[in-house]
Image (tube, helix red, strand yellow):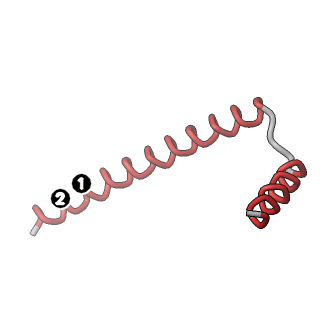
Amino acid sequence: MNRLRQFIKESWSELKKVSWPTRTQVRNLTVLVFVVSFAVGLYITVADTIYTEIIRFMSTAV
């Protein structure tokens, strides 16, 4: 039980040293993640569509 208490005390002490982001930073980074995810998804969709059409064209040309 003493080990658990010591662990919690040391963990709490370390958490006080952490530099936590502000609400504005969290919001901005969250928006950035959504925008980048959307852009990557759009890129993959467009690339997949193009490659699908290329394969379809090549298979009908044979």
Q: Say above or below: 59 vs 27.
A: below
Q: Position of residue 57 (x, y in %)?
A: 18, 59
C-alpha separation, residue under disc 2 versus residue under disc 1: 5 Å
Q: Residue at x 86, y 56 (%)?
A: 14
The residue that mark 2 highlights is 56
Q: Residue at x 78, y 56 (%)?
A: 8
Mark 1, secondary structure of its residue: helix
Q: Position of residue 52 (x, y in %)?
A: 25, 56
Q: Position of residue 49 (x, y in %)?
A: 30, 50
Badge 1, how many Cα within 10 Å: few under 14, some, many 20+?
A: few
**Which mark is on residue 53?**
1
**Which mark is on residue 32?**
none
**33 sits left or right of 6 in the view:** left
Q: Residue at x 88, y 54 (%)?
A: 13
Q: Are marks 2 and 1 in contact (CB under 8 Å)?
A: yes
**26 sits left or right of 17 in the view:** left
**44 sits left or right of 53 in the view:** right
Q: Residue at x 64, y 37 (%)?
A: 30
Q: Amino acid at mark 2?
A: Arg
Tell me the quarter of the image containing the N terminus. bottom right
Badge 2, how many Cα within 10 Å: few under 14, some, many 20+?
A: few
Mark 2, secondary structure of its residue: helix
Q: Residue furthest bottom?
A: 62
Q: Say above or below: 22 vs 49.
A: above
Q: Amino acid at mark 1?
A: Glu
Q: Nearer the viewer, residue 27 or 19?
A: 19
Q: How many marks?
A: 2
Tell me the quarter of the image containing the C terminus. bottom left
Q: Quadrant of residue 27?
A: top right
Q: Nearer the viewer, residue 54 or 14?
A: 14
